[in-house]
Image: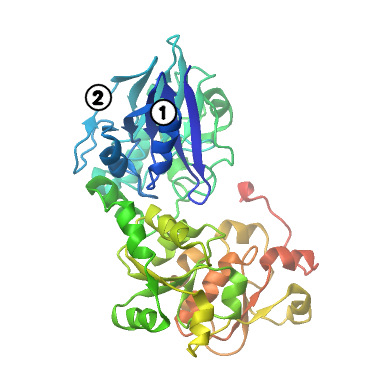
Amino acid sequence: MMKIEQIYTGCLAQGAYYIESNGEVAIVDPLREVQPYIEKAHADGAKIKYILETHFHADFVSGHVTLSKKTGAPIVYGPNAEPNFKAIIATDGQEFELGEIRIKVLHTPGHTIESTTYLLIDEQGNNHALFTGDTLFLGDVGRPDLAQKAASMTQEQLAATLYHSLRNKIMPLEDNLIIYPGHGAGSACGKNLSKETTGTLGDQKQNNYALRANMTEQEFVKEVTDGLLPPPQYFPLNVKMNKEGYADIGEVIAKGTHELTPDELERLANEAGALVLDVRTAKDFAQGHIPKSIFIGLDGGFAPWVGALIGDVQQPLVLIIPEGKEEETVTRLSRVGFDNTLGYLKGGFETWKKAGKEYDVVSQITAKHLENDVQKAIFFDVRKESEFLSERLPSAVNTPLDSINNHLEKFPSKGKFYVHCAGGYRSMIAASILKSRGIHNFVDVEGGFKSIKEQGIKTTDYVCPSTL
């Protein structure tokens, strides 16, 4: 009897898959830390036979290289893949036996030129499931702009290619086919992904805008390319690592969990150009932090925000971490390619204070105390543009966090202004960036727009984002 398990990582909105049949296992799109897959196979009395990669991922570093080294299982890519390491480059339609089932390669270029989906054929010879990677999501399809340089094609040409991949390879398949996508809501690999992480092809034919039966190629290209935001800075660097290989995660963790004294951390920041990354809570950071440190808390979309805002995966980092979260932090950084972590401050921020070092705070205000000041105050809203257009304070200016460095000239150099997001996480990241740029004349709104609304402060009428 076959076993399919989705291993979903919420921080990355990423789905890896464990498929087992009669003692043989295939892993689809594994995460960087591979030991859980090895242990799962061992518990099942099974052996990992194949590592299936749907494409060269841009938003995370896959565990394919390490998993292959540890297990001897070959890495499988679809046509057009040219990795710098040994791999099986499958042909379109090629089948791989796994216990009593088969996995068929369906080359579906468009998101990238090597993008491939894997069709699972069960013991009875029936098409059972499709592992779609970033070709087909629930509610959306993969964006066609990420691989245009590598493919020597425009995003419109890639979108047209994707149109034919979907219609010639996927849409003719059975409606009851289970769809296992590479990502869910929150990923930057698509525009409007569903919060659901599994579905059926029939449901997608009914509800996914990109699979409309009467859709022309021209309409598809226009709709798929419309409204694409610039990809995060770290995406091409992750693609490079996935194609060329990378350091073993054990080495990365050993280096990153090196204990530092306050003087050592200060020296690395001043002399080695290390960025101080504070991953505590927003509340802790507001109450006290190392000057010029950047806050990106573990309790939010940590790794993608690090990738989007720091960008360069080679940037040396030193960390301020809640006790007991050292290995978790370094692991989550490595998932998006940030392997150059040089250590963490032993004893955390309290050690810094006890050493008599200078520290900074973030001024905050509650929505209750904000009410009297709201009519004459200046507000900067760091939510996404779609959130801002949907509902906002009438006088607010939108400065989205993911592009905040492009908006620095909008922030006044004199006089008080306020910063808020939806709930307080993103605005504290923005606060740390502003302070690191020498901008200190602002107040963060605790609880963000949610608390502003709960306080009954006047906002614009709500507009559903889908109608904008």
Where is residue 93, by image quadrant?
top left
Q: Nearer the viewer, residue 367 or 100?
A: 100
Coloring scheme of the render? rainbow
Real-space CA distance between mark 2 and mark 1, rounded to the nearest whole angstrom: 18 Å
Three-letter residue code for mark 2:
Thr
- In the rendered image, residue 189, in percent from the top left (x then y), is placed at 44, 46
Secondary structure, mark 2, is: loop
> Is residue 397 visible to us here?
no
- In the rendered image, residue 140, in percent from the top left (x then y), is placed at 50, 38
Q: Is residue 465 above or below residue 347?
A: above
Residue extending furthest top? 124
* Residue depicted at x 57% and y 81%: 288
- In the rendered image, residue 185, in percent from the top left (x then y), is placed at 54, 45
Where is residue 386, by image quadrant?
bottom right
Work out whether mark 2 precedes mark 1 in sequence or the reverse, and give the earlier one.
2
Q: Is residue 353 above or below residue 78?
A: below
Q: Nearer the viewer, residue 6 or 207?
A: 6
Q: Nearer the viewer, residue 349 or 81?
A: 349
Secondary structure, mark 1, is: helix
Which disc is residue 185 wearing? none
Q: Which residue has dot 1 on it?
A: 166
- In the rendered image, residue 82, in percent from the top left (x then y), is placed at 20, 39
Q: Which residue has dot 2 on it?
A: 91
Q: Is residue 271 above or below residue 75?
A: below
* Residue depicted at x 30% and y 49%: 239
Asked if residue 9 lies left or right of residue 422, the reply is left
> Is residue 417 visible to us here?
yes
Asked if residue 435 lies left or right of residue 148, the reply is right
* Residue depicted at x 46% and y 66%: 403
Three-letter residue code for mark 1:
Leu
